[in-house]
Amino acid sequence: MSKTLPSGFLWGNSVSSMQTEGAWNEGGKGPSVYDIREASEFASDWKVATDSYHRYQEDFDYMRDLGMNCYRFQISWSRVCPDGDGAFNEEGIAFYDRFINDLIARGIEPMICLYHFDMPLALAEKYNGFTERHVLDAFVRYGQKMIDCFGDRVTWWLTFNEQNIYHMPEAFRVSGYLRGDKTLRELYQIQHHVMMAHVQLTQYLHETKPGKLMGGMLAHQLIYPATCKPRDVFCAQQYDEFLNQNLLRVFAGQGYSPAVMAVVEREGFSDIYRADDLALIARVKSDYMAFSYYASKTLNSDVIAADVPVNYYLQQGDVPNPYLQATEWNWQIDPLGFRAIITRYYNDWRLPVFPIENGIGVIETWDGVNPINDDYRIAYHRDHLQAMKDAIFIDGAQVVGYLGWGLIDILSSQGDMRKRYGVVYVNRENHDLKDLKRVPKRSYAWLKQVIHSNGRDL
């Protein structure tokens, strides 16, 4: 299918500040929970990242050359508010002011994500992150300040990167949680406080900046049952309800899933969910639905104990899908799953769909002379873009854009520089910063052709 994508389609790149900026102790920035994480055999520390704090203009020039017209980035909470709920740092705010203006000057539309796992250390240490409602209030205060500062120029907003992670066991790694027994009650506290921050800031954006758009975002967990055995199918459906549909229902203005609230009642968690919270959740609606997608998963119910909470199913029941190839990190490549998600989002919720992370992470080395030949990356993006086009032109989905993940190499979410997603190589390793030179790979020219043809020529 060679059709050109709709006029105004957004092409671009997604990153987080902790994986790109560096400058961990410059410009008045306070420490975050990532700044104190030490390097290990297969992980860098977070102090330099790809040094985009000093080099972002070079990266923006590559984006402009590629034809990108959208860039999703995260504001570092501790750069603009060093201790999370105290005085704001004008130097940090001025940095993002220049950053946004430099994007717009290149014809690139900014998309702001307010939180991508790097809690200000002071809040994490004092309150144990989003387990405490005070941190919800501090986040809303910070988010409102950013909307006040940048809402005149930024149309596209996100509160949380991959918000359903806060209802998975991984929540304890990304929510500022530093101590405790990682109980189910704490998991539900984190999930609800994060959701309340999202709806409060969505309401604030709508009231103060009419026409600006707030999206809800998932790390979409597409789960196949391992067999057609009824329990495999039922457990896969339950997991989808708790980890995906529950949040999508809120984003669509329907409130939490009845199945989730039944667990809340049964476990004695109802005090977490205040009546005025639930009333607000039921009347605030997001403007678009965003998600990340890299791979699908397969669930075998036989190995899931009967008393395991649904939120933990994948920890026990994840099995390889024999019909799919996998990357070096065992992420199974499934472009048809990408189409299935896009089509279902639009069929179910009738809100614009925006896939804002998609890519393949691969171990790559540069010989110092020749561009890296990454035909596997071209194949991955070609197949996923074709799947997206099929969702649009065959299935009738409304899709507003496509953002790749880390199209200039960055630290992985685990801090591992070996896992590279970019069409531009960054010359550093986990424990050797080298010169941080940016070097286009073979996929760069291919992606440039795709964007300049607005998806016609894959």
Image (cartoon, grey):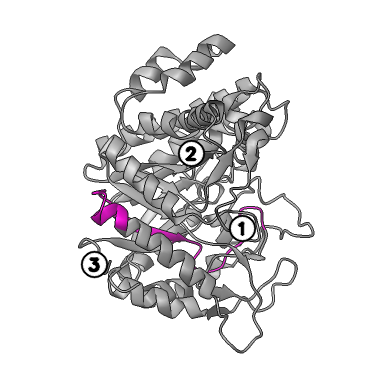
From the image, tell me which residue sits under label 3. Answer: 4
Q: Which residues are magenta?
A: 390-415
Res. 288 in view: no
User: In this rendering, is residue 348 above or below 107?
Assistant: above
Left or right: residue 61 compared with residue 311: left
From the image, tell me which residue sits under label 1. Answer: 412
Pointers 3 and 1 in contact (CB under 8 A)?
Answer: no
User: In this rendering, is residue 380 above or below 214?
Assistant: below
Q: Nearer the viewer, residue 81 or 104?
A: 104
Q: Which mark is first along the chain, 1 or 3? A: 3
Badge 2 element: helix
Disc 3 versus disc 1: distance between alpha carbons?
32 Å
Counting other residues with Cα less than 10 Å from the Cα at mark 2, is it few (<14), some (14-19), or many (20 or more)? Answer: many
Q: Nearer the viewer, residue 26 or 224?
A: 224
Q: Nearer the viewer, residue 362 or 69?
A: 362
Is 422 magenta? The answer is no
